[in-house]
Structure formats: structure tokens, C-alpha cells
Amino acid sequence: MDTKLLQLLENDPTLTHAQLAAMIGTTEEQVAADIARYEKERIILGYKTIVDWDRTHREAVTALIEVKVTPQRGDGFDRIAQRIYQYDEVESVYLMSGSFDLTVIISGRTLKEVALFVGEKLAPLEDVTGTATHFILKKYKEKHLIFPVQETQEERFVLE
């Protein structure tokens, strides 16, 4: 398995087969075959564009939710994690070590929409014993990509 190819694709999925072949010292045909195999074996699960929504007119709120759950005999945390990630609002779910069990990342249009998701859908789940919601105020870096600093525009008033 060529982990260099996978790393290059993870960092920039827009690279062409020719570019990838030149970077790892192989042929375009071999790159195409490897990528097809990785997709078939579900090593490559998909391709994702990262958008800086703060530079658009779209309103969005992202939250990281710490979730404490009761693990189930035979299933551990898998069953409750599967139940949680079925919701459209949920972007990611991670099993954690430490003082809570799952990290759930969700997005919504408003703080209220996120709060309603936690209060009406997540917290009432049978095996959920507690939640703590943290709102992401500003993104600096995601998936190795640095978000450029936005220059703030100062309003200038002319006084006569």
C-alpha cells in the first residue's frame, strides 16, 4: 500500500493522476489502478472540499458536543454512535478517551437550531447520560488547511 499516494490525495484531492505519478515516481496507470482499488476497498471513503463559510453570506454555526453514554453489552459504544451519526445535522462522531465518551460535531443555521438538536434529539436518547456543548467561534486550521485572516473593514466617519 502506497501511503504517500494516500497522503497526497488527502492533502489535495484535485491533483491529477499525472501529477500524482510524477510526485511518487510511478505511472499514471498505476496511480489510477491504486486509487480505484482504494475506493473499492473503502480505504478512500470520499473527497471533500473545505469551505470557509465565514467568507460567504451563508450563516452557519458549528458545535462540538461532549457526550457521555452508557455502553451496551456486546455492542460497547457502537450502537449509540451509529444512532447518533444517522442525523443529518451530525458531521462527525468520534469515540474518545477521558472524561466523556463521544465527540459529536454538528452544524446548524443558528445557535437555537443547534440547541434544539441537542435538547430534543441527542440528550433524550436512551443511552445518553450527559452532554456539554461548545460552539466553535472561529476556525484557524482544518484538515491541514489554514483559514486566511479576514481583514476587518473600519467604518470611517467624516466629521465637519
Image (cartoon, rainbow, N blue to C red):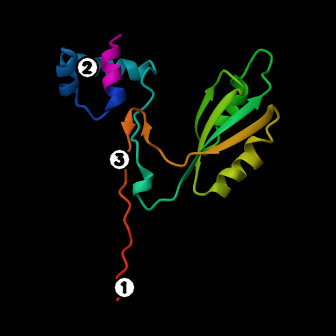
Residues in magenta, as a range: 1-8
Residue 3 on the magenta span: yes
Mark nearer the viewer, 3 or 1: 1
- Return the residue at label 1: 159
Task: Estimate how packed mark 3 is, as few (under 14), some (14 to 19) or many (20 or more) residues with alpha carbons within 10 Å.
Answer: few
- Return the residue at label 3: 148
Pointer 3 and pointer 1: residues touching (CB < 8 Å)?
Answer: no
Residue 116 point in image, percent of width and height = 72, 53
Residue 94 point in image, percent of width and height = 61, 28
Task: Estimate how packed mark 1 is, as few (under 14), some (14 to 19) or many (20 or more) residues with alpha carbons within 10 Å.
Answer: few
Residue at 17 percent of width and 21 percent of height = 22
Spatial separation of the CA atoms under disc 3 and disc 1: 34 Å
Mark 2 belongs to which amino acid?
Answer: Val
Residue at 69 percent of width and 22 percent of height = 98
**Mark 2 or 1 closer to N-term?**
2
Mark 1 belongs to which amino acid?
Answer: Leu
- Relative to residue 6, is residue 63 depicted above or below? below
Q: Which mark is residue 107?
A: none
Count of labels in the image: 3
Q: Is residue 45 left or right of residue 128?
A: left
Q: Which mark is residue 31?
A: 2
Residue 149 point in image, percent of width and height = 37, 49
Mark 3 belongs to which amino acid?
Answer: Pro
Quarter of the figure with the N terminus: top left
Residue 28 visible in the shown view: no
Query: Viewer-proximal residue, 47 or 41?
Result: 47
Spatial separation of the CA atoms under disc 3 and disc 2: 32 Å
Local SS, label 3: loop
